[in-house]
Image: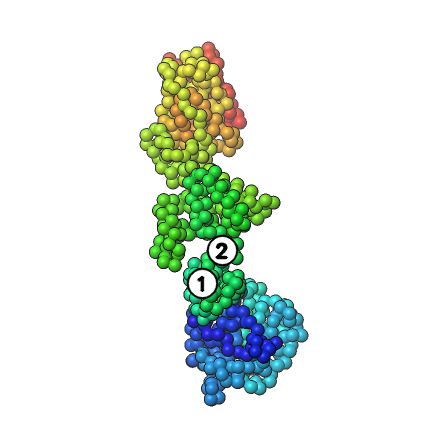
Amino acid sequence: MTSPDLSPDPPGATTGQTPYRVLARKYRPTTFADMVGQEALVRTLTNAIANGRLAHAFVLTGVRGVGKTTSARIMARALNCVGPDGTGGPTATPCGVCDNCRSIADDRHVDVLEMDAASHTGVDDIREIIDGVRYTPVMGRYKVYIIDEVHMLSRNAFNALLKTLEEPPPHVIFIFATTEIRKVPVTVLSRCQRFDLRRIDADVLAKHFAGIVEQEQVAVEPEALALIAQAADGSARDGLSLLDQAIALSGMAGADARITAEQVRGMLGLVDRSRVIDLFETTVRGRPADALKILDDMHRDGADPLVVLQDLMQFTNFLARAKVVPDMVLGPEVPEAERKRGQALAEQLGQPVLARCWQMLLKGLGELQAAPVPQAALEMVLLRIAYAAGLPTPDELLRTAGAEGASGRAPPVAGAPSPPPAAGSAALTPPPPRAEAAPPRPLPGPAAQLKPQAVADPADDAPQTPVPTDFRALVELFAARKEMDIYGHLYAGAHEVRCEPGRLEVRLRDGSPRTLASDVMRLLGDWTGRRWVVTVSGAVGEPTLQEQDRAETDQAIADARQDPLVRSLLEAFPGAEITDVRRPGDPDPASETDETDLIPDPEGADEDEDL
């Protein structure tokens, strides 16, 4: 518990009436033992003073209100304290009653000089320090120079200080404090011992404030102290200023004063936590009408849309942490209503849902800050989250895809619309399948020998085609249905990665149409009457059908060259080449339309001629 600062009253005090001192000054720590939340700093400096291993320069960094300047003043007292009897040495527990301690507390010690670098930024100010370090202390043991907000010094001022900072006289100690450590030159940092003062945890601040209100004889609800500690954002000074404001808001003093959580929420512009939970729950459960009604009620009560969104983000993070470390998050310091509802929601909602909600809220934060009407922007964010509540998560999509691959049909996700395509995939959701009809006659032969009259008229939607069982049959189906452009791209530019009923995965060559996968899936769905998923993969896959057919032709030509009759013909006609091989029973290409002429050649040349 922090003891009140016993330094004299501020100037202007009148007889019989003492001016009010704000809590941040009244309860400012005067010893290392009074500091809260900075155990590493206290332990290091205490041991250094006890062992006589003091550096000649220190730099203290951290956010506002965590104790940088306070620590510097305590160090000045500790180094110059002589004890009540005047015979003591440097100590980590300054007495507070000797002349040095009291004069340092009153800011009138001639050997402890505190300079604000924000208003003294030039070389001339540093020159005064350089000139002064040559003289020995007048009253104390050390001359202590405390430079607050040291990052505000100019570059020339830093350069002027370097030599003195590196090799100061033994009676000089430099203590720098800054909130912008990155702006301090590394040449200065390398000459100092650096201490990073951490933000003070909210529970530590709440406990600290509880001790102060007890001394002030003010009754404060524990939830109100927790709200103030949370709003302080790790700063003890900010928290004490808010506590001062809350006491003034209560309109009472002494034993009659009582601060409630509702008063603190109104003072800070916060929303009742239960209403934030109601808003979150109705949104993630896909009830946009209820969510907008709750939001309208909160807006009429004066809730700031930005604060509401930040509260939703904080509660989302709370639930995500509760799923991972429930014992740490759902502790007794959390209000009972919030703990019970939070635990129930954390058990019901998965991490993917919470992660998706967090991303949408985070994106909405930027939209809210840029929107001309923040309330409308917040409504749009909630509507997006409510709509996305019915969509499957990525792991559900993967399970759906796996089940479809095993059964040939995708099982529906309960309460969810058709899954959207995965990132980087060309898969689209096809239209609902029509009722199955009697299949047409089986398709004949290779693609170049298909007879369209043997297949049902593509304009007739009633007949449906049997589901192809392999990639070649699937590609030939497009030739039979007179979709020659798609057939050409599949035949000459698609590498089969995976093909099974209802699923096709291919690697496409460069230059293929972007809509090829979606067109294939749509047409297959129309023709076969079932759902197809077509994806573009980065896997190598099999050679294209054109490459396979060419390899087969090349092998047939090589075998034909070994035939005695063919060899004799080649000898009789010098310069003749075998370009194609046709076996007995193959149809005469002259009697049919050669549809392979419509196939785009990846090499840009047509080399096929009949001998």
Residue 88 lies, in percent from the top left, at 46, 86
Snapshot quadrant of residue 410: top left
Residue 492 lies, in percent from the top left, at 47, 27
Q: Is residue 419 above or below residue 194?
A: above
The disc labelled 2 sits on which kind of residue?
A: Arg
Does residue 411 show up? yes
Disc marking residue 265: 2
Does residue 575 show up? no
Snapshot quadrant of residue 561: top left
Q: Is residue 327 above or below residue 377?
A: below
Residue 554 lies, in percent from the top left, at 42, 25
226 sits left or right of 159 in the view:
left
Identify the secondary structure beneath mark 2: helix
In the current view of this chain or complex, which residue is farthest to the right?
Answer: 124
Identify the secondary structure beneath mark 1: strand
Task: Please name the residue that numbered disc 1 is placed on.
Answer: 220
The disc labelled 1 sits on which kind of residue?
A: Val
Q: CA distance from mark 2 to mark 1?
A: 13 Å
Snapshot quadrant of residue 91: bottom left
Residue 404 lies, in percent from the top left, at 35, 31
Quadrant in the picture for the N terminus: bottom left
- Within 10 Å of disc 2 (Cα), the crowding (few <14, some 14-19, many 20+) is some
Residue at (38% x, 44% y) in the render: 349
Q: How is the image coloured?
A: rainbow
Q: Is residue 42 above or below residue 109?
A: above
